[in-house]
Image (tube, rainbow, N blue to C red):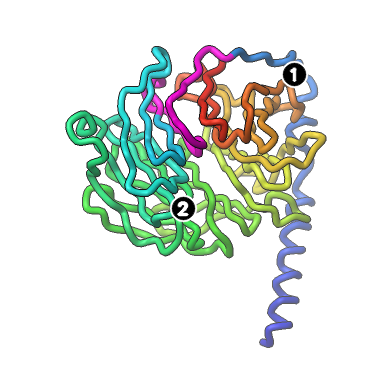
Amino acid sequence: MSWDEFQRRKAELKAGIHRDRTACRDTDLKESSKSIEALQEVRMRARRVLRGHISKVYALHWSEDSRHLVSASQDGNLLVWDAITQQKTRLIPLKSSWVMTCAYSPTGRHVASGGLDNIATIYNVDDQIRNPGEHAQILGGHTGYISCCRFLPPDDGKMVTSSGDGTCRLWDVTTGKSLREFHGHKGDVMTVSIGANPNIFVSGSCDGLAKVWDLRDGLCKQTFGAQEDSSADVNAVEFFPDGNAFAAAADDGSCNLFDLRADQSIQVFNTESKVPNTSVAFSRSGRLLFVGSDNCNCNVFDTLKGDRRGVIAEHEQRVSCVGVPRDGSALATGSWDNVIRIFN
């Protein structure tokens, strides 16, 4: 088979998949929820302002205790915060200031970071009192930057990373060894999310696709496009609380809710502008979807209706990360204005 024939066959298969998916779509979430009352305007107030970083905040992640969170900044530090008292409980200096991601472990004993140094570094939180910056483990093997890292529940023993080398990896944190590689994306992989099912994770890439992977065999089980007619970078993915769907936010301003059982998008969230989306998070119930964007705002959508029900506009620069703790009590937003704000 020649290259041209291969490309033609590929296009035919993609068109056939799209046609079959469309044929199976007898309704969508907005249509099926007509009988449910729409939400009123959502107004959230900033209850806490976490100041301490002196450069852009790139990432944040809540602890399982719903009280502490870790943030990563281009100032070269990880900060661990008590979100209630607004106090910094740990300062972890990084060897590389070009950090892109951070994560809190399920037990709360470890935090992790990754960035342009191509490695994920694990830190014991308690050890930082005596020896700030001392690492517990280094996960090296990617040939591109680390864009996202997440511990696998229920303990701190395994981690999933995504990278600019176009792959994801599963790691044994204790030994530092790579257990499995996930190949399939044709661009930088920007984000990963782990949901209620500990055997799968979803990734988003600059190839415009989100892929669902099985951790047990390393195979891609489902592939979704941010938009059928777009190849915009998928900047953020986040599983719905029950693990049966996920949101994918893209560089063209679109955000989709993909259902694993329907094998397609069941809701599209759009604003008037095409401002790139940077981050996503669900409320505890899943009824609200928070989408951070390049225009300094965080949009609040009604998941069922697809309508925007509020705008949080208290940052002065790009909202780079958003997160909701497990108990659903608050929303944290991090920005390039060096500040993290806590809303409810």
Q: Residue at x 60, y 33 (%)?
A: 319
Helix, strand or loop under label 1 = loop
Q: Position of residue 4 (x, y in %)?
A: 73, 82
Q: Quadrant of the N terminus?
A: bottom right
Front residue of 12/67: it is: 67
Q: Is residue 291 above or below residue 285?
A: below
Residue at image mark 1: 36
Q: Does residue 250 appear in the picture of this structure?
A: yes
Q: Is residue 65 magenta?
A: yes
Q: Position of residue 257 (x, y in %)?
A: 66, 39
Within 10 Å of disc 2 (Cα), the crowding (few <14, some 14-19, many 20+) is many
Q: Residue at x 75, y 26 (%)?
A: 308
Left or right of 343 in this view: 233: right
Q: Residue at x 64, y 42 (%)?
A: 249
Q: Quadrant of the C terminus?
A: top right
Q: In terms of image quadrants, where is residue 178?
A: bottom left
Helix, strand or loop under label 2 = strand
Q: Which residue extends farthest left?
A: 130
Residue at image mark 2: 162
Circles 2 and 1: CB atoms closer than 8 Å = no
Q: Position of residue 286 (x, y in %)?
A: 59, 26
Q: Position of residue 123 (x, y in %)?
A: 27, 40
Magenta residue span: 46-69
